[in-house]
Image (cartoon, rainbow, N blue to C red):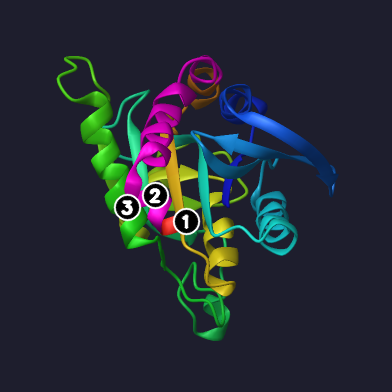
Amino acid sequence: MIGIMGALEEEVSLYISKAEIETFETYAGMKFYRGKLCEKLAVIVRTGVGKVNAAIAAQILIDRYNIDRMIFTGLAGALVPYLQQGDLVVANYLVQYDVDLTAFGRRVGEVPSVGRMIEADSEMLKQVTDAYDAVFAGMSNRPQMIVGTVVSGDRFISDRKTIAWLQREFGAVATEMEGAAIAQVCQMNDKPFLVIRTISDSAAEDAPEEFESALKSAPENAFNLLQNMLSSDRMEKAVV
């Protein structure tokens, strides 16, 4: 059973429309759609925005549905100039940049008993890079895909000073509001996970307008990747 998550309606509606939904249940105000996507058992949920919502949804997926692995897709702001709207970022490490216990001798982003940089599942990373090569091969206008550090915090970034700090402190390439919380829940429950983000904006002054314009089209690239991953024999063997 695979847990598929997104923060906004636009980020999960395509998955729900393509899935064979058998049932749905509501927990903590969130609807959990259970069925099949590409012949794989899956539960799809819109978490809402922010780390708390994401963490609650992730734990519900683990406790009530006994999912084997977690995939979170959605939009993110670019922190490096070579990423454009529609490009894809797959997180190999995630960190909560707004956790600050430096007063107690810890580094910014370090969570006691959890750590600072939470690593995504290496096999799932390999699957998504293979999927990218298969889905976008030969396309002249294909989006970029890079693997790098994604930072999460309960704040929409839209200023260059913060961008520079996130780059310098964490070597981050993208910022969003949920991924690292899901990573922490999965690490604590020993569940493999993957975070795929589509670039919506530059995280600078024009970020709100760019984000709104990306909501209509950006999720399709991530869906195509996930569809290819789920259709592969390796994903079948990994889940069973």
Q: Position of residue 3 (x, y in %)?
A: 59, 49
Mark 2 or 3, which is nearer the eye? 2
Q: Give the residue type at disc 2.
A: Met
Residue 9, image x, y percentages: 66, 27
Whole-Å distance between the Cαs marked 3 and 1?
15 Å
70 and 142: which is toward the camera? 70
Residue beneath disc 1 = 239
Residue 113 position, x and y percent, is 55, 83
Q: Main secondary structure of the magenta part?
A: helix
In space, the residues marked 2 and 1 are separated at their CA atoms by 6 Å
Q: Is residue 238 above or below residue 36?
A: below
Tell me the amino acid under the disc marked 1.
Val
Query: Was residue 223 drawn as part of the magenta stretch in this picture?
Result: yes
Asked if residue 233 is positioned above or below residue 100 in the image, the reply reads above
Residue at the spot of label 3: 125
Q: Is residue 96 left or right of residue 225?
A: right
Q: Nearer the viewer, residue 110 or 48?
A: 48
> What residue did someone put label 2 on?
235
Tell me which segment is drawn in magenta.
Answer: 212-237
Q: Is residue 26 visible?
A: yes
